[in-house]
Image (cartoon, helix red, strand yellow):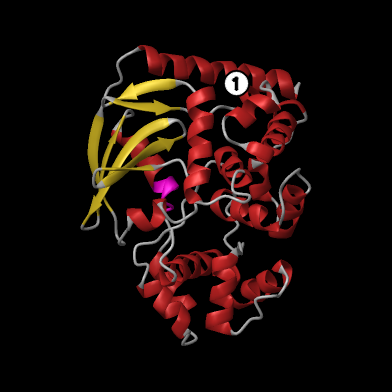
Amino acid sequence: MFYEKNRYISNIHSLKRLEIGRYNIQTYQFQLHIEEEINLQKIFDGGQIFSWTKYYDGYRGLIDNIPFFINYKDNILYIKTSIPEEKAKQKIIHFFDLGISVKDIVKKLVSTNDQYMLKAVKSNQGLRILKQEPWICIVSFLCSSVANFNKISLNIENISKNLGEKFIFCNQPFYTFPEPKVIAEQSISTLRNYGLGFRSKYLMDLAYKITYKGLDIPILRDYTYNESKNILKSLYGIGSKIADCVLLYSLNKNEAFPIDRWVQRALRDGYGLDIKNSYNVSSEWARTKWKEHSGYAQQFLFQYQKELNNEK
């Protein structure tokens, strides 16, 4: 029943994508005033999302396969999209998680006279954690193994261009991200041809389990942090770091604290942790210290440490 149900849904989505490509798309433009500063560059180039690209002074990308051009100045988001203003506003508010106050989170992060965190925060004003769709998020971080930001972005672009649906909006080409069933129908060699390399088998296994075995990633939002993390880690190719990234960026687990080499160095330089500590030891230390705001602590430290080393 799961397969038949999802095949039906997949067909509906495919028809919608074909309609997008076949007919002229209406353009809607509007402004959205927001209470707190936003820095689009810190958000979109900061390692949490890989499917949005720079476009003049702003960025362009898809939210739920809907095209958006977004710019920001003086607490106003300037938005161009293909859906009416009210629906678009709902998507933007959810995507940027505008219902929470980052200022309040920052106050708690630096309330213990944490000078290292204070420097990280001051260097990254306007940073926010996005609320992504779990499917593209988990694929993105499956592609992150032994890869940098540009390589991951290229992998996502190649998947979309080869397996998604192309459409034109405001004279710009967009490609929808393919659903799990589309990827499950490919061969591993085909995915390798898109530049995924050894990651191809991870992606194929994930797509197959979602399409044919009833694997439900979004439902993990209803599980505890430890429960959802253990389920993700049981999947082929997913370890603690990838699991924490998916939990933080798409499954509302704000206590997740992904650790890479930059975060390891930040914990060493700012807090005296041994860089040789295991992932679990460092992660537990961080989550004990920053609790439900660990995800934001991680994002500020990650960005700051990279800036200190002048790397993207």
* Residue 79 belongs to the span the image colors magenta: no
Residue 156 image position (x, y, % from top left): 52, 37
Nearer-the-camera pick, 4 or 167:
167
Seen as rendered, the residue at the extreme left is 74
Element at label 1: helix
In the figure, 68 relative to 221: above or below? above
In the figure, 108 relative to 31: above or below? below
Nearer-the-camera pick, 222 or 197:
197
In this orientation, does residue 110 appear?
Answer: no
Q: Amino acid at mark 1?
A: Ile
Say whether residue 240 is left or right of residue 53. right
Nearer-the-camera pick, 77 or 181:
181
Image quarter of the C terminus = bottom left
Look at the image and give the residue range highlighted in magenta: 93-97
Main SS, magenta residues: helix
Residue 56 image position (x, y, % from top left): 24, 43
Say whether residue 105 is left or right of residue 195. left
Residue assigned mark 1:
9
The residue shown at (44%, 27%) is: 175
